[in-house]
Amino acid sequence: MNIGSVAEQSGVPAKTIRYYEEIGLIPKALRAENGYRNYSDSDVETLRFVQRARKLGFSVKDVGNLLTLWRDKNRASADVKKFALDHIRDIESRIEELDSIRQTLVSLTNHCHGDERPDCPILEDLAGAFK
Amino acid sequence: MNIGSVAEQSGVPAKTIRYYEEIGLIPKALRAENGYRNYSDSDVETLRFVQRARKLGFSVKDVGNLLTLWRDKNRASADVKKFALDHIRDIESRIEELDSIRQTLVSLTNHCHGDERPDCPILEDLAGAFK
DNA sequence: ATGGAGCTTCTAGCAACTGGAAGGTCAACA
DNA sequence: TGTTGACCTTCCAGTTGCTAGAAGCTCCAT
């Protein structure tokens, strides 16, 4: 199977597949006689795994570790769970930060009349007038 | 005033100030006879503005536009507000995405017993067993 | 005068790709 | 058989927003 079909079936763009190979996230693909990369169905599965993990926000490095756990049929589910829990904490802190920003912005925009006049609490706040 | 004092007073690291100058976010600093950058109090104000806007999650490019609006004493507050509202929408969509990821992960971890046994719904889901 | 802190420039690296150029290959159609 | 066009290859550059480090001035206090 050529890289294009794998891209289609896994949802990972061909460029990205080559990139993953280059950084060692996935093993180097076998080559056909013409030099084209040659993939099997199990390579597609791997890339689907990667794709899903990335969509859940795991870093590429984390995905590498998850792949290792996945391949290790003797892993302890506790190891995987720890991984996921860490990631949840990370995501929650990002959400909190974004939400605090959001609240600030909402409050500022509520106080900005938003017409043709120049005075604007948003800029005043950024300038530190009321800090 | 040297770059170090400005860094301290504005909260923007010296390296970052140079970087902002290089990319044109802030104007090129005047130079003293020894070649050192020479700043005024108003430069500190500008950098504080930049710092606050960045902390509110505005991109550097957006900060540039906000600076322009800030300097334009005839701007319409509507222009600033539009900017902020766009940014709020952006942040909200990021929050939503993170929250959806969070929910998925929480649900997966809840189903993972997390002990020494190898079977793990998290990996199974990533592998697409139940897709 | 000497030591250390602070300043200068330059280059390179981080994450995680994405786009484009230049060129080889393959399959189908006229 | 020729040629078009879709694929594939590699390599280089760009994105965003810095940050680290190296090599080398300058300044001030002792």
Image (cartoon, coloured by chain):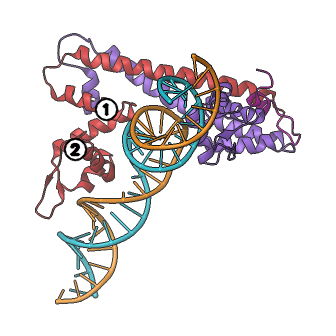
Chain colours: A red, B purple, C cyan, D orange
Give residue A109's position: percent from left, percent from top. 75, 30
Magenta highlight on residue B83: no
Left-right relation of B125 to B66: left
Magenta-colored segment: predominant secondary structure: loop
Residue A61 numbered tag: 1
N-terminal label among 1 and 2: 2
Instruction: Name the secondary structure under disc 1.
Output: helix
Q: CA distance from mark 1 to mark 2?
A: 19 Å
Q: Residue at x 64, y 48 (%)?
A: B24
The residue type indicated by label 2 comes to: Val
| Residue A44 numbered tag | 2
Q: Residues within 10 Å of mark 2 (few under 14, many from 20)?
A: many
Mark 1 vs mark 2: tell me if same chain. Answer: yes
What is the span of residues highlighted in magenta in the rendered image? A114-131
Does residue A1 sit above or below B6 in this rendering?
below
Who's the residue at 89% across and 40% down the image? Answer: A117
Would you say residue A116 sits in the magenta stretch? yes
Q: In terms of image quadrants, where is residue A27?
A: top left
Q: Secondary structure at mark 2?
A: helix
